[in-house]
Amino acid sequence: MEQPKGVDWTVIILTCQYKDSVEVFQRELEIRQKREQIPARTLLLAVEDPEVHVGSGGATLNALLVVAEHLSARAGFTVVTSDVLHSAWILILHMGQDFPFDDCGRAFTCLPVENPQAPVEAVVCNLDCLLDIMSHRLGPGSPPGVWVCSTDMLLSVPPNPGISWDGFRGARVIALPGSTAYARNHGVYLMDSQGFVLDIYYQGTEAEIQRCARPDGRVPLVSGLVFFSVETAEHLLATHVSPPLDACTYMGLDSGARPVQALMKMCLLVGGPAWCQSCNVQGVGVSTCIFTAYVPDGSYNYMTNSASEFLHSLTFPGAPGAQVVHSQVEERQLLGAGSSVVSCLLEGPVQLAPGSVLQHCHLRDACPLPCQGPIHIGTGCFVSGLDVAQSEALHGLELHDLVLQGHHVQLHGTRSRAFTLVGRLDSWERQGTGTYLNMSWSQFFQKTGIRDWDLWDPDMPPIERCLLSARLFPVLHPSRALGPQDMLWMLDPQEAGSKALRAWRACWRLSWEQLQPCLDRAATLASRRHLFFRQALHKARHVLEARQDLSLRPLIQAAVREGFPGPLMATLDQVAAGVGDPGVAARALACVADVLGCMAEGQGGLRSGPAANPEWVRPFLYLECGDLARGVAALAEERDKWLSRPALLVRAARHYEGAGQILIRQAVMSAQHFVSSVPVELPAPGQWVVAECPARVDFSGGWSDTPPLAYELGGAVLGLAVRVNGRRPIGARARCIPEPELWLALGPRQDKMATKIVCGSLDDLQDYCQPHAPGALLKAAFICAGIVSVHSKLSLSEQLLCTFGGGFELHTWSELPHGSGLGTSSILAGAALAALQRAAGRAVGTEALIHAVLHLEQVLTTGGGWQDQVGGLMPGIKVGRSRAQLPLKVEVEEITVPVGFVQKLNDHLLLVYTGKTRLARNLLQDVLRSWYARLPAVVQNARNLVRHTEECAEAFRQGSLPLLGQCLASYWEQKKLMAPGCEPLAVRRMMDALAPHVHGQSLAGAGGGGFLYLLTKEPRQKEALEAVLAKTEGLGNYSIHLVEVDTQGLSLQLLGD
């Protein structure tokens, strides 16, 4: 489903507490802009708080000042002016404080969810969810102004929260429902009946919380979401020059002001003087009205420092299986119900118990001792940031109620890894008795041999001795790299022995508080991104090799936009070269073409175009010879020369699609298995063999017969053989001639040949595979019929004289206009083959002929499916089907209709020539590109085409014109989904004019032009509809034709000279 239009933000600014993180988070915003999560024109800013503990209010004021300064500079001002806010939609996002379960903070905590509609595949962080909520749920409809959003909570907001913005001025807070029990540890709003904020209670008393309760017993929780209208934002901005709030901004600090902490309660909800007094800033508050928008169907969950609460928010109690997101897991049966795995690569047996979470881990069970069993992560665990090198440390352990994390740190400019281990039940608060690894400190000391002086300085007061300040975590070992074992030994010190304790004591160790400024957030995010693409490469390989109908387009977009196209193309090369299946290889090459097309970034020209540059001949020849490995390697070698600019990238993409067409041809050539003939008496010298055929009209299922859909999905098409204006409009005739030559003629009628060609040598046949060359189809017919071989050492005349004692003359004709959509070229190929084979003394059955045409069209390189020859060579009403397998075999079922229904159908069926020439070639390329990309809408539509064919067949069996009309209408909608752009404007006008008079209508074939066929409500409506169209403007050169079901199909007869 298409994402509704969101807020076109003028500025999005992210505040953070560490200066070193600004560039990192700026890049993260830019990446999201490349993913189309943020409008392309939005100004993105990341800014550090002036001081680490400046408070949410101070951070907001500083961010607003920075935004105003940038917008003022953009507008050409030399000073900061609030005028720039009047037409701006601004979003301020606050990173907040450190988070013990993610080195990059709560904003970048990854969630076990996926967005299947996202154009670019990516792990979903809390920041992504909040951006989506602000852009598509809360923000739409709001006037220019400033939105402020904390990132320390998990939010859920319905698509339409029901907030009225008509004439709004002032400040508005967003409140979400919560229980009174939950409110005891959070903030709640006290509102009056009109929604005005009277007070805010943070960790209020039971009486205060009850005062805020609504009729349903729930209370409006403070959510960290505030909106300021332009007027209120201007007043707030003006405070940046007023002491002491000037010290909340970088300008104030740069001017020498002493830093202060400004609370959101004081600085944002500025209506109450008492709040200002409490912070000694009386007189700088701005008098305004604070409104509440209460969203009763939303939810709010603050991300506390409790590991138990954090695990609860990431797991799915009661779920039947594990939630596996952006991860590749070899043995999913080892994942416990309700657990979650996010952005991981798990190779071999890795067991995860219910209620536990794995994130950003690449684990491989390569233990040589099978008796140790799989890596076992027990209940209540959160494990993050481990790589293959650390997998061995997990063997032989069964973790329970633990948080094990790998960290990227930077110590005096040197990058390294560190590992932390804490208990699920450990408290991060400074007050209280405190625990470590879910036990008291005294128990921990007794168990491990560690002493308090190992962790804290002797002069540190006992009240300050807690988990935050304990120097538990090694960051540097004198002689080796650190690993999880440097912490995990504490779980079983007796088995680890005193050596582990001595090694731990020998390390330079930091407390959790000391570790935070050393965290390398750039390396952390880069490592996560590399792991995401590492598992993505495994995913791409698995999707292709397992022939899954899963789109890789979002993954391709991600790889290109985030700098990983090379590894992805290398993986696709490996799949194409090693799979041994031309169908899978063709899809892999199509994916490479998609990568190249994405790299061009919409420049360099159209994706569809020629693909016969001489530089690509060598890899194409390998593929033609069936040498996939060398062909793919040669393609990659040539590809590397075409990566320097968009025009070359697009041309390279076309050639990769051309390479895919070679493999499709080879797959379709398997239809030759079902081509056979029997010898019959040769016609008399000079005697003509005349083949005549009806046209065809497709009533359902078209496109499903087109390779590769025909053998990857399986096809089903219902078609009618039809006469147009009482005539069978397509035919061919052939005869033997004494001259050892091939005489070819083409024309609009049997007695009117417009083009004549004489082939006296094999050189005259060399353009048989160039569809637009004169007589190419006829030349290909001679080759496919086995009459001549262009690769023979014998000359053309020698071949003809040796086998037949002379040459052949072949004429073909079609009374239908070019691009009619009635299957002309394929039916013409069938007629030509039938006439030629009979003239050469062979009889070919109609079903064999259907497969022979498939072969011929691959030789001709036009591609195409099997529905046209089924529709025109076989009589009456029938369904053709092909199974999802190779070799490609088409089976035909005649549909039996009620007595008299054929005549009734003839009376209600009309053809209208639209005057527009159909461009099926370009439509075909677009459809194949979409199919190989496995775009979800295209895959579902293709399945519907097949299913709808069986429903249409039932409508024929019932003899119901209204049902058939519904089938036609549905079919046309399916065609438009399959090939957008197949309905020209003039055709739409024509269909609108005819709609009141018909049960249903559709363009024939692929659409785009040609004939429109319609099922009229009343019989014999040709003259009436001519009158209707005569009154309709803008239709062009159209004409209406009678049409009737042909019950004969292909006919062959011998005529005299």
Image (cartoon, rainbow, N blue to C red):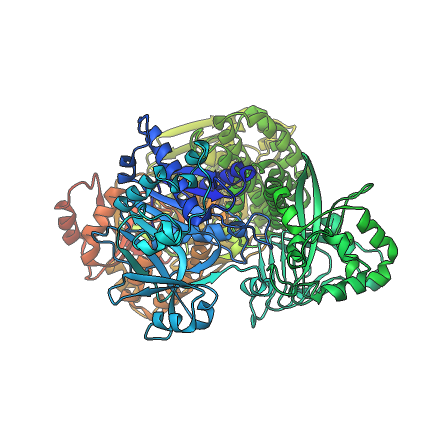
* Nearer the observer, 683 or 748: 748
| Residue 580 is at least partly visible in this image | no
Quadrant containing the C terminus in the rendered view: top left
Most distant residue in the right direction: 498
Whole-percent x, y for residue 563 in the image: 56, 36
Most distant residue in the bottom direction: 216
Whole-percent x, y for residue 365 in the image: 76, 56
Placement of 178 over or under 573, stated as above or below: below
Relative side of 193 to 950, left or right: left
* Nearer the observer, 650 or 731: 650
Quadrant of the rendered structure where residue 359 is?
Answer: bottom right
Relative side of 113 to 725, left or right: right
Q: How many marks?
A: 0
Placement of 806 over or under 1030, stated as above or below: above
Relative side of 614 to 868, left or right: right
Q: Residue at x 79, y 57 (%)?
A: 450
Whole-percent x, y for residue 936 in the image: 46, 53
| Residue 1017 is at least partly visible in this image | yes
Quadrant of the rendered structure where residue 479 is?
Answer: top right
